[in-house]
Image: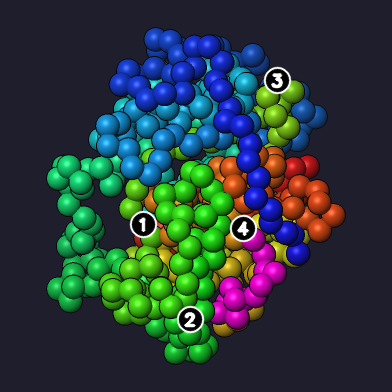
Amino acid sequence: MPTTVPTTVPTTVPPAGLSAGPTTGPTLAQPAAPAPAPTTAGAADRTAAHGGRRRRVAVAGVALADCGRVDEATPYALHAQAARRALADSGLDRSLIDGLASAGLGTLAPVEVAEYLGLRPRWVDSTAVGGATWEVMAAHAADAIAAGRANAVLLVYGSTARADIRARRRTANLSFGARGPLQFEVPYGHTLIAKYAMAARRHMHEYGTTLEQLAEVAVRARANAALNPEAMFRDPITVDDVLAGPMIADPFTKLHCCLRSDGGCAVLLVAEEYVQDCRTAPVWVLGTGEHVSHTTMSEWEDFTVSPAAVSGRLAFERAGVTPADVDLAEVYDAFTYMTLVTLEDLGFCAKGEGGAFVQEKDRLPVNTDGGGLSACHPGMRGLFLLVEAVRQLRGEAPGLQVRRPDGSLPEVAVASGTGGWFCSSGTVVLGRS
């Protein structure tokens, strides 16, 4: 089992013309201009140039925008800040970017975000399936690049969810509406957290999972966050602290639930021929999977099985690896039960054994940055999972750095996002080779 050690790495300083500070202007580096013409006649030519095979896809750059308490920036500014930092991290020129994936901001996302960033992409994706959005988008982007339909795709996100509530620009999300399928649940006050709480209770009933086991998820997340200087909450907590907190939705007390923060991040995916020009060694996209399950709770066949059971299987099959080959996992953790059931459904332990698994002392490293429970959670957090997984594989984690038993860097990581109330899932397997 891989070990984890604290480490400190220097902050990457962007080159001239790619300021990493907040911005109110709509550019990455210079005024908007059309992307350069492709170097070949089209996708067929790019495929032919690789002997008829699909191109490999690598993560070239990752970065966080300012996270935590960010009262002065706009969501657009956080998008730009994250994009500039990820581009600087890659060492590539912005003119290479011909694809953009964005969701959650603007009326015509990702058109508004592209305009703000000064980009004119030829490939776009605005898939919105909740927290799993970014893993699903990464899958789409990787397929597009592999098929020669794009060369470099930027995935970017930014949110001021905490600051907006603090400034009374919005209220907390108590409901996602009362139309369509939701009309059958809204009269009963069935909020998002209540849906997760109901699923957790079912797992406890079916498999004997305990409150202490669920609380251990929060305790481990906080222990990881304690080593991460970028995490929002770093003070240690105990199982007793979690159990003694104010009840939010039975069985979830406050510390079973994710925090609310501001923040943003970005990931740049590129075709294999551009890897030689990157600042760091590549992290390869080995396999992806996506799956949607339900939106109405009555249509969910089994509250103890998440859609990660399908997306994970597909991602591992396409990557040619098994859960036993994975050195670390970054999974969506809006609530403690999400971590437990996702680990089961990805195959790291058998169904019903998640409670015992999360209590194991030397188990698989999970949510090494502190996750949504302690590090940050500005909204659709799935993109942060990919950033942390890449940092771990590079050996650039800001706090807890996973190492294999022989001291070497991890080779394989999995990022698995969940959206809605276990409505959707996207899983991405990443590797150093």
CA distance separating discs 1 and 2: 20 Å
Residue 37 image position (x, y, % from top left): 55, 12
* Mark 3 surroundings: few (<14), some (14-19) or many (≥20) residues within 10 A: few
Count how many numbered circles sit on residues in the image.
Answer: 4
Earlier residue among tags 4 and 3 = 3
Taking depth in this image into account, of 147 and 173 the one nearest to the observer is 173
Mark 1, residue position: 259
Q: Is residue 22 above or below residue 333?
A: above
Q: Residue at x 51, y 54 (%)?
A: 225
Mark 3, residue position: 277
Earlier residue among tags 1 and 4 = 1
Q: Is residue 13 above or below residue 58?
A: above
Name which residue type carries label 4. Answer: Ala
Residue 29 image position (x, y, % from top left): 45, 14
Residue 87 image position (x, y, % from top left): 54, 24
Q: What segment is highlighted magenta in the picture? A: 354-365
Mark nearest the camera among 1 and 4 is 1
The quarter of the picture where residue 196 lies is bottom left
Examine the rendering and report whether any part of residue 153 can be seen.
no
